[in-house]
Structure formats: structure tokens, C-alpha cells
Amino acid sequence: MGEPRTKNSLIESAIRIFQQKGFQMTRVSDIVSDAGVAQGTFYNYFRSKEEIFREICNDFIDQVQKKFIERTEHLFDGDTSDEVVKNVHQVVRDLFQIYHDNLTVAELLFREGIGNGGIFKEIYEGLLSLFLELIEEQVEKAINRGFIHIEDAQIGSVFLFGLFERSLLYFMLIQKNTDLEKLERVMVDFILKGLSFDYNFKA
Amino acid sequence: MGEPRTKNSLIESAIRIFQQKGFQMTRVSDIVSDAGVAQGTFYNYFRSKEEIFREICNDFIDQVQKKFIERTEHLFDGDTSDEVVKNVHQVVRDLFQIYHDNLTVAELLFREGIGNGGIFKEIYEGLLSLFLELIEEQVEKAINRGFIHIEDAQIGSVFLFGLFERSLLYFMLIQKNTDLEKLERVMVDFILKGLSFDYNFKA
Amino acid sequence: MGEPRTKNSLIESAIRIFQQKGFQMTRVSDIVSDAGVAQGTFYNYFRSKEEIFREICNDFIDQVQKKFIERTEHLFDGDTSDEVVKNVHQVVRDLFQIYHDNLTVAELLFREGIGNGGIFKEIYEGLLSLFLELIEEQVEKAINRGFIHIEDAQIGSVFLFGLFERSLLYFMLIQKNTDLEKLERVMVDFILKGLSFDYNFKA
Amino acid sequence: MGEPRTKNSLIESAIRIFQQKGFQMTRVSDIVSDAGVAQGTFYNYFRSKEEIFREICNDFIDQVQKKFIERTEHLFDGDTSDEVVKNVHQVVRDLFQIYHDNLTVAELLFREGIGNGGIFKEIYEGLLSLFLELIEEQVEKAINRGFIHIEDAQIGSVFLFGLFERSLLYFMLIQKNTDLEKLERVMVDFILKGLSFDYNFKA
DNA sequence: AATGAATGAGAATTCATTCAT
DNA sequence: CATGAATGAATTCTCATTCAT
């Protein structure tokens, strides 16, 4: 009873190997030998290689989705420009945190989702649309409230998302020594200016 | 002089199938049957499945690389803000054009490059670094000339690249009916404002 | 004294599943899950999957064998044709009964014994020879006593056996609603006439 | 071109091994090593182990079915008892021939069709029903014409079929040295008498 | 006796690549 | 150059059996 040790160690190994070699190139034999169990043991816990991948992603997806919705709702909240700026900072910081806490899986999902021929494209693209919609909604609200100006809210959302996702992964995965506080500061500044934010706005 | 018909038809088929199924999922037999030649014929022209992929990408990479260098060099050229704006527009438009002309291969390289476990990660990441360096150089120059302001040139470059690449692929591949002129306009505006461009600048 | 409950429940489950899926396709895990015990428990009672099958068959075989010998010995007993006819009826009825009482196992053994590649072929073919010998012996005796006439006793025995076994299984398994009394009547009539039985015989 | 040598040798090997070990116990590796080709070669010709089995059976089934229909139609043809007897002989001889010519496959299909858990049960049982129907039809016709007497035509057909199939397989496969002409003679005699055939019949 | 996690040999199938014609 | 049959290494997944608790 309560023997998820084997299962956990399979999951940990799987994450590690998936990240190194990608889903397709990862062999079940790689996972089990990394986990130090027999080939058959794998199939006591997962029906297939795909299933363990889904199981790995699902936690992350649920969490990210929930937090993203939660945070993004308040992206441009505030009655004065100062409050709004503070809020944007807060949201960006929170999203940084989510990614940071789940960096490995985030990368995994990102790569497999973008990568061709994947069964995971659909998962990833589902998330992507959701995020874009949420962002667009906030951008539109802010446009209506009159303190940001951009010709097309949807285009703006794609800019925000691309800028955010790409740089996060770049600075968290490739250029790892980056000062995240600075990144946040520069990002918020860039975004707000890009959106022609009215820094003197008062409700 | 013109490549033999057979080789071209293999390349065309390969591009089509790679794009549909991705590199890993594409079988040499898919390519040859699409091209209407025998299995063995493939190996008269390409040493391996990988080689045809590289050959497909190389043209695109060479071209993109050359044009990117060429164009980017003039990103912020100009003695007045009007001239600079015009130039940025020009560069963005040219890059749009390159992507547009090579959309299929661009997507291919993008997906395989991002996708995990690729032999193509290295190709893609090489390009990425090159582009980031080139952009950073221009951004730095513009900062020094005093008409844009951003705390960190490298971070800014990553923003520019992420924003540009992500939205291009989004609007060219997923939301295909987008008005590209509008996209260009909104993008240039967003970028320049995001970079605190001095719209009244005069050399 | 009574077998332990667990063993019996394993045997019952095994019979059910073997009949549904056949020996090869039945997994030990099917049996144990049907019986509601753990995988390991199976091996406290049976050394292997094969062993439980043998054990299931053995009871039936012993019984059938014993009764078959017992009955067949008296197949054509009797001093008048009436007595002989009555006896043949009795034997046929008894054999019907044995099959009827053990229909599931009879089918199991029949199918696995006929079916190729079986370890059970040998068991089944052993039974088959025994039966054929016993029948032949009786047929020969009857020929010698002069009230049936057939050119070759062995061939006749195979006819009797084929006719009997095939129709029993057909009418008990496939066309289940058949009137068994009628079947008996028609069968005895067919057999005796086929064997040129002398209906006016008197010792 | 015209290289069915490999395919034929695979089929021959498959028949041999299937017969020895049965479908389930036969490994594709057994077949290819018997045929002297590589494992992969098998899959150039057959999609699966099941497919080669079906392909093997189909020829036989088609042939048997066609001839069985053809022959059985004339089972009790004739205007005098002599003619009818001659015809029955002819039909039995023809069916013997069909089985004899395809003995290996006939056995294969018989065993796999009877055997439990098979995908081939359905094929076999389809054939069985067809045959039973055809025989029954003839028996009924003969009853109506008044020269055979049996209480139930269906039961009689099952007797005929069981007797025929079982003894053929017994004497062709197990007791191989049997005199087939004698078998035919004894069988026709047994059948006709069993059916209370009127040996003095005239239309 | 009962448990059920762990085992690992073995099976089917795929597919890039070779090579004789 | 073109062909396409042959190859066989590699991979996923199954399941009877074992054994420590």
C-alpha cells in the first residue's frame, strides 16, 4: 500500500528523459533504466508512453490554466495609472513564478506542443487560444476604459503573449543567469509603452 | 543548371509530407510514394532522411540569413524620426515577405527546431542567436544615438524577436485571413513605443 | 472434505473464462479478477495456467471415461432384438446425460483438444482412441453374434463416434432448443439401420 | 517482377508451421526462419499473421464451397435406386477428392475453426451452416420423393456431416493407411441404410 | 494463506537503408 | 539512373510467474 515510490520515480525519470530527448526519441527502455526498474513495471503504472506524458502535463496544465485565469482577470485593474502599473507588475511576477516553479514541464509542453507531428499540438494549441482570449478580453477592457491605445486588441494580445512566452523561456532556459526582477521591470515598461499606456490616467 | 526532375519532385513531396506529419512521423516511403518513384530512388539523391531535411532547410536558411543580415543592418537607419520609422517599416515588411515566400519551410524549421529531441534544434538555435545578436547590435546603436530608450538591449532584442516570430507564425499559419498591412502598422507602432522611440528625433 | 472456497472460486472462474476466450487467450489476471482474489493467490493453488486447465478436465475425463467404459460394455447386450434396441437407447441416453451434465467442460475439452497447437490435443486424442477402441470391440462382438453387418468394424466405430459427438455438440451448443428425446430416437434408428441391424434377431 | 517466390515460400512455410503448432503458437519468427527470409520480409507480403492465415484459407474455402454446392445439388439425383446409389457414390468420391487435395489446409481450418478463442471460428461456422443447409435441402427432397425415410431432415444432415467430416479427418490424418475406396463403400452403405433408403425404388 | 508489485523473456510490427538487377 | 525486394535492428507492449511482506 502507499507504494507510489516506483510510480514517482518513473515520472521523475520520464520528465528528465523527455526533456533531454523529446517525446518521440525517448524510449520506454530509457525511462525504466533511468528509474532502475524492469521494463514491465512501467506498464503496471501507465498504459503507454503517451499516457505518462499526459499525466505529467496535466498537473501543470491544470495549475497554469487556473492561475492564468485568476491572474489575468486583474491584469489592468486599478483606478489610477499607479495602481494599474502595480497590477501589471503583480500579474507578470505571478506568471513568472508559475513558469519558474514548473520550468521543466513548461518547456516540455512548449516544445512538444510546437513540435511537428505531435499528439500534443492540440493540447498546447488549446492552451494558447485560451490564453490569447483571456488577454484580449483585458486589453479590450483597458482600451474601453481609455488608458491604453492599440489599433487591434487581438494583434496586441498575440504580441503580449509572444513577447512573454518567448522571453521567459529564453531567459529561463538558455540564458539562465538573467536577473528576473530586471526582466520583469523591462517587460512591464515595454508592454505598457507599446500599448500607449496613459501614465497619468485617473479613473 | 536545373536540378533533375526526380530530385525536385522528391523535395517537393518531402516538404509537403514533413509539414503534414513532422520529420519523425514522415516515412521515406511516404515521400517516395507521393513523388511517384521507387523506394531506392530516394537514396540516389539523398544519403538519408535527415539529409533531405537539411537540404530543404538550407536554402531557406541561407536566404533568410542573408536577407535578415542585409535588412537588419538598416533597422534604425535614418537622420530623422520619419526616416527611421520608414526604415523600420521597410525592414518589417521585407521580413514579412521572406517569411511569406517561404512559409512552409519556415514553419517546418520552426516546429522541428523548437520541438524536442531534434537534430534540428541546433540549426534553429544557431539562427536564433544570430538574429538576436544582429537585433541587439542595432538596438544598441539606436540607444547610443539617443532616440530609443530601454534599460537592457539584449532583453529588448528578445522581446522584438519573440513578438515578431510568434505573431508572424500565428497570423500566417493559424489566423490566416489577417490583414498583413495592418499587422505591420500595429507592430511597428508597438515596437517603437515599447522602445520609447523619440518620435521627434532629428540627428 | 470440501475444497477451500478460494480454490473453488478460481476453478469456477477459470471454466467460465476458458469457455469464453479459450485457453490461450485467457489470462491468469482474467481468472483472478473474476474470482476476486489477488494475482499471487492463484499460484498458491495451481502451479500454472496449464495445471488448472488439466485439473478442470481431469474430473470430467475420469467421469466420462468411467461411464463410457461402463455403458459401452453393454452397448449391444441383449438376447432379442428388442432387448438390444432398448440397450442401445439406454447407452445413448446415458451418454447424452454425461455430456449434458458437463456441457461446459465437454465443450472446453473438445475445442482445445481439436484446436491446433494444444498441449491438450494429446489428452483429447487419448480419450478419442479409447472410445474408438471400446466401440469397435462392441461392434465386432455384435457382428460376430450376427445381428449387425458392416464391412469394417473400425470404420463403423469412427462413424458412430463422429455422428454422436458432432451432433451432440451441435444440438447442445449451437441449436440449443432441440428436443433431446427425439434426437435420441432418430440417432438410434439411424445407427442401427446404418449398421444393418437385424430387427428380428433372436439369440 | 513476377517474384512470388518469396511469398510462396512464406505461404508454404506458414502452412507447415501452422499445422504443426497451431495459429496461436506459431510465431512469425518460426515462419520466416523456416522460409529462410528475414523477419521484415514477412511484412512486405502480409500485413499480419492473421492475414497470411486468411489468405491460406480463402483459396481452400472458395474451392470447397463451390465444389460442395455443385456436387451436393446432385446428391440424390436419379430415377432408379441404382442411379441414386451411383450418384451418392460420385458425390462422396468427389468430396473425398476435394479434402484429399487440400488436406493440410482442411485440417488447419477445421482445427482453428473448432478451437476456442479463434477469429476463425466464425469462418468455419459459416461454412458449417452452409453445408448443413445444402445437405438438409437434398435430404428433404429425397424424403419427398419417397425413397428415404428419416424423422427429421435437419438431424439427419448433422449426422451425415459429422460422420463424413470426422471420419475423413480421422482416416486421412491419423490412420493414414486406410483404403479410401473401401471407406467410400462402407460410408455410402451406412448412410443409405441409416436413411432407410429404398433399394428397390423406381421413379 | 493472501497479497500485489516487480519481473523479464518474448512477441508483433515498423521502417530506414542496402544492393543486385 | 531507376527499381523494389530484402534486410534486421529497434521498439512497444504482454503476461505468466515469483517473492517479500
Image (spheres, coloured by chain):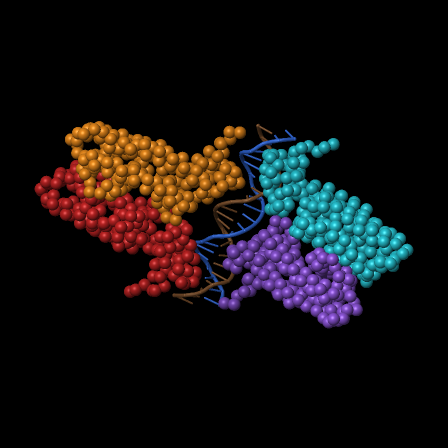
Chain colours: A purple, B cyan, C red, D orange, E brown, F blue
Q: Is residue D14 left or right of residue B177?
A: left
Q: Residue at x 39, y 40 (%)?
A: D19
Find residue B1 and report its image quarter.
top right
Using the image, determine if residue B4 lies above or below residue B170.
above
Residue C173 placement (x, y as % from top left): 30, 49
Residue B157 vs residue D124, the one in the foreground: B157
Q: Among all residues in the image, which is located at the extreme left?
A: C202
Q: Residue at x 24, y 43 (%)?
A: D155
Q: Residue at x 23, y 36 (%)?
A: D141
Would residue A187 be seen by someone viewing this image from the given angle?
no
Using the image, determine if residue B202 lies above or below residue C188.
below
Q: Residue at x 52, y 59 (%)?
A: A45
Would residue C102 be seen by someone viewing this image from the given angle?
yes
Residue C181 vs residue B189, the one in the foreground: B189
Is the C terminus of chain A in the top left, top right, bottom left or bottom right quadrant?
bottom right
Residue A80 placement (x, y as % from top left): 75, 71
Residue F7 placement (x, y as % from top left): 55, 38
How many numbered marks are there? Answer: 0
Residue B139 vs residue A35, the one in the foreground: B139
Using the image, determine if residue D110 lies above or below residue A55.
above
Residue A162 placement (x, y as % from top left): 71, 57
Q: Is residue B125 left or right of residue F7?
A: right
